[in-house]
Amino acid sequence: MTSPYIPGPQGWQPAQPPVGAQPAAGAWPGQEPQWGQQPAWQAQAQQQPQWQQAQQQPQWQQAQSAQPQWQQPAPQWQGVAPQGSWQAAPETAGYAASPGGPGEIVPVDEFADDFASVLENHSVHRSTIGCIIPAYNEAESIADVIRSLLEQSRVPDVIHVVVNNTSDDTVKIASEFSGPHEVETELGLQFTEVFVHDIGKNPDKKVGALNYGYALVEGYDYLLGVDGDTTADRRAVEYLENEAVSDSRIGGISAIYTIDDRPIKGFIAKWLIAGQRTQFAAFNMQNLLRGRNMAVLGGQFSIFSTTALRDIMKENHQNSPWVKDSEVEDSLLSLQIKSAGYLTKISPFARADVGGMTTLKGYDAQQVKWTYGAIELMWPGQRGDTKGQPFHPNLRLRWFEQFSMLTNFFVRVAFITLLIASLSINAFVFSPWWLIPPLVAAGLNLRMARAMEKCNSRDIAFAVLLFPAEIFMWIRISHFIRSWTRFLSKKKVDNWALQARAEKGGVSFGHWTPFIILAIVAVAIAVIWNLLDPITQSAILWVGWPIVGVVTVLQTLTMAIKLFQRHQGYKV
């Protein structure tokens, strides 16, 4: 193999000169020829002998005293180069000046062979990935998380487990994996090293652990953030890296999230997990159908360009990518990445199983924290150090979610109220049209269940039986009410601490508060209703039922559009 280029002082330069070209004066010996520096090749050709007459040029003999080695090239290299290249003139052209300086003759073919060897042996993974696992009391799952990363087809170049505020055996278990690892995959032999950092008491909680980890991997091309209870399919990192490398505009890519319900025990826990699986599936599908533009690069399993992180730090005058004053650090970071001109995407292939909430109070605390943080980002004006961005493109889906929850709350409460009121005065007339909304909702839930990559019988039952999904909707409505009342009250609370306390267990009735309030309001409405005269009661029903009917029709049409919307082959 021969190459038309040889290394020179300015990089790789053409090995073959233009026809009739002569090197610039003073270029040889001792440095590579700088072709094209003479204004007139023809004029110079008249002053100097042609290359074909190189043996007659006096310059080589004149250089004998200073550079004697140029005079007598080793004869064994002559005639080796194939015809058609400029090495074909063996008298003078079989050699090139070495990059090491004058006095060392290196065959051009040797440069070509070395270059070809570099290309053949070059690794397909040209980017570097540093993985961060913030861990808080993850003794039950941390081993599976690390093992999942070590079994990836594309293993991260380094894995940092950052343990904070932990009271269990997370550090001990994670330390069993610490040290270098050599992994053989279909992509070749790969090397990584696992480090475990116990940073002790950390007032900034997960945000502090993430920023600590960022300082360790900021020199890498990409940062892979993984929660301490998230395991990924074995090609997830490979898929994320391939897409991130393919487009420099991408600031971050999220995997598709779901929950593995196989190890879940208990009726309530299985019901809650089925609801959360449906909730994740709907959210993922909405983002996939929006051009794969991800509203939130969740910290569960997402890859970030460190270039993008540095840009948002500079643009927002931050010392670190994540800020501690937001309840939803991943949502705020996603907004900042988008505002900096980068894309936030969701991968159609990379998948990860996240940790689900198996108790009502744990699920309540998590959802209230997420919803409260989203409201902070959506709300016009500024609360604390976080400025609301109500018109940010990444928040459109959040606005739709909040409006949808408000509609669900209104329709259900209004329907039950009007139904009881109508029955109390024998004014209710059943119409089969009222069966259409729940049937459309069940159909939509069934289609979403069938769109799951790992759909099972529990997902189907949750969708078609109506009651499991309806009760789960009431639970979500209670989260909606608690989040908004907490936000509007302007009461400063630590939702991180409340979630941690809820996950630990113990007696708590906070998540039942909305239902207790609704019961009290219902009793009050019943008392007031009985005090009204029949004419007033009839007037209320005459106005109330049409309003509920119109809102219900609009809501049903929205569900029908989603029911018949093409999923474009995506699986969630």
Image: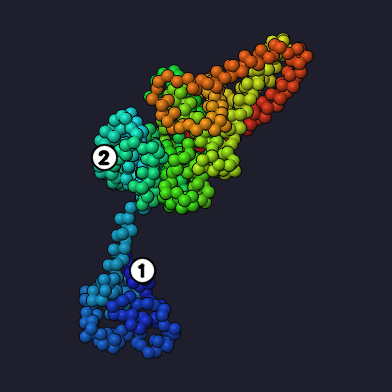
Residue situated in front as seen by the camera: 442 or 327: 327
Where disc 1 sits, the SS reads: strand
Q: Is residue 59 left or right of residue 385?
A: left
- The residue depicted at 32 percent of the width and 85 percent of the height is 53
Q: Amino acid at mark 1?
A: Gly
Q: Which mark is residue 170?
A: none
Q: Position of residue 254 (x, y in %)?
A: 46, 41
Q: Report which quarter residue 362 is drawn in.
A: top left
Front label number (1 vs 2)? 2
Where is residue 119 shown, x and y percent of the image?
Answer: 33, 58
Q: Earlier in the sequence, mark 1 or mark 2?
A: 1
For mark 2, give the secondary structure.
loop
In the picture of the structure, the residue carrying the numbered disc 2 is: 178
**Residue 413 versus residue 198 in the image, above or below:** above
Residue 372, image x, y percentages: 52, 33
Which amino acid type is marked by label 2? Answer: Ser
Tell me if I can see residue 520 in this picture.
yes
Pointer 1: what residue? 11
Q: Taking 147 as reference, is 428 above or below it?
A: above
Give the quadrant of residue 137: top left
User: From this viewpoint, is residue 480 visible?
Assistant: no
Seen at 45% across and 49% down, the residue is 318
